[in-house]
Amino acid sequence: MARQRVTAVDLADQTGESVFRIRRMLDGRVNLTVDDFGMLCEALGLSPVDVVVAALGVTS
């Protein structure tokens, strides 16, 4: 999974959320719901499952 340089403004444009809310999500100031997580993954072109597997360090 390659790193991407994406700003909160980019994510707001792609998701339709406000920049303020995106920044609060990314800063951890609001709880991220499953729907929020899916929305962010979709905006980044990532599979939510792949993100979780990578975060857990699971290898096959």
Image: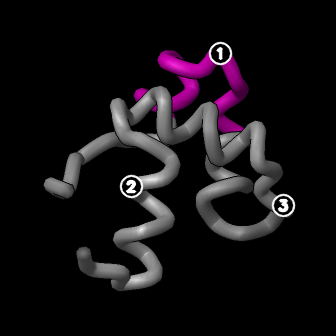
Residues marked 1 and 3 touching at CB (< 8 Å):
no
Q: Nearer the viewer, residue 21 or 40?
A: 40
Which secondary structure, mark 3? loop
Sooner in the amino-acid sequence: mark 2 or mark 3: 3
Residues under labels 1 and 2: Cα distance?
24 Å
Q: Give coordinates of residue 23: x percent, y percent.
A: 63, 50
- For the residues labelled 1 and 3, the Cα–Cα distance comes to 17 Å
Q: Which mark is residue 16?
A: 1
Q: Residue 56's x, y, as percent?
A: 45, 82
CB atoms of marks 2 and 3 within 8 Å: no
Q: Using residue 50 as the reference point, say whether residue 27 is left or right of it.
A: right
In the image, farthest residue toward the left: 2
Q: Is residue 15 magenta?
A: yes
Q: What is the spatial separation of the Cα atoms under label 2 and label 3, in whole angstroms?
A: 23 Å
Residue beneath disc 2: 50
Say which element carries label 2. helix
The magenta segment is 9-20
Residue 16 percent location from the top left of the image: 65, 15
26 shown above or below 45:
below
Q: Secondary structure at mark 1?
A: loop
Helix, strand or loop for the magenta stretch, by majority:
helix
Tell me, for residue 30, which label it has, or none.
3
